[in-house]
Image (spheres, rainbow, N blue to C red):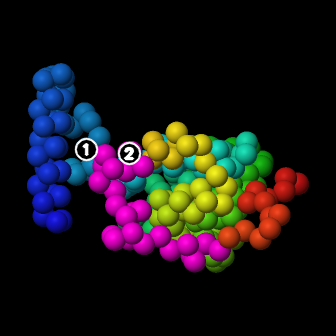
Amino acid sequence: MAALSFIVNRKMAEKMRAQRESLWPHVQDDELWMPASRKGFASIPRTMPLIQKIMNDWSKNKPLSATYFALWCRDMGLGFVTIGSEQELALESGFTGTRATYQWKERMKILAQLGFIEGKAGAKGEWTHVLIWNPYKVVTRGRAVRGMQEPTWTALLGRMREIGAEDLNPAVAPVAAAVFPPLPPGASPIPPTP
């Protein structure tokens, strides 16, 4: 199946390249961001915009998407990030000023409470080591606990079908609900604001 997927993807890429060249014949490859021939790229789910919308909906006026995306940009394809500087991640997440690191840590706590990440303290601070959980499984579990607008859920499922993501197919990868235990009754996934 993997070989067939590679052939299909290669053929699709060739078609897209031909279309691009017909629309912009003057553009050279070195003027575009082409990860296969460049260093310093990240692999992210193609559904990331929908995942970010969902997490922002759940975080109640404390947008998480920039913080989450900054983590993905540091992942080397292992679902794991080591953070050398909290100040650097705060800036990459869009926070500046005297409260930047505080605001970043607040977003990290919310991401952890929602089940998107898990952190371990280390020499560089509270969030030295971070696991990035499979967002499809997190969103599925969160939908059962927190709810979700039906158009958003169906858009996510539709886009997953479109790109061939099988993370929610029980025959391929069962959803491990035990990874993220349900919240206790009356508990909020959002920490109180000081």
Q: Is residue 53 left or right of residue 11?
A: right
Task: List x then y, in percent, for residue 35.
Answer: 27, 49
Mark 1, residue position: 34
Cα–Cα span, label 2 and label 1: 22 Å
Residue situated in front as seen by the camera: 135 or 123: 135
The answer to if 138 sits in the magenta stretch is: no
Whether 176 is among the magenta residues is yes
Q: Which mark is on residue 44?
A: none
Label 2: which residue? 159
Please report the residue visible at 12 percent of the width from the left and 24 percent of the height from the top: 22
Label 2 vs 1, first from the N-terminus: 1
**Where is residue 192 shown, x and y percent of the image?**
84, 56
Please name the residue shown 13% across and 64% down the image: 3
Magenta residues, start to end = 157-181
Local SS, label 2: helix
- Quarter where residue 79 is shown: bottom left
Q: Nearer the viewer, mark 2 or mark 1?
A: 2
Q: Residue at x 33, y 70 (%)?
A: 172
Which quadrant is home to the N terminus? bottom left
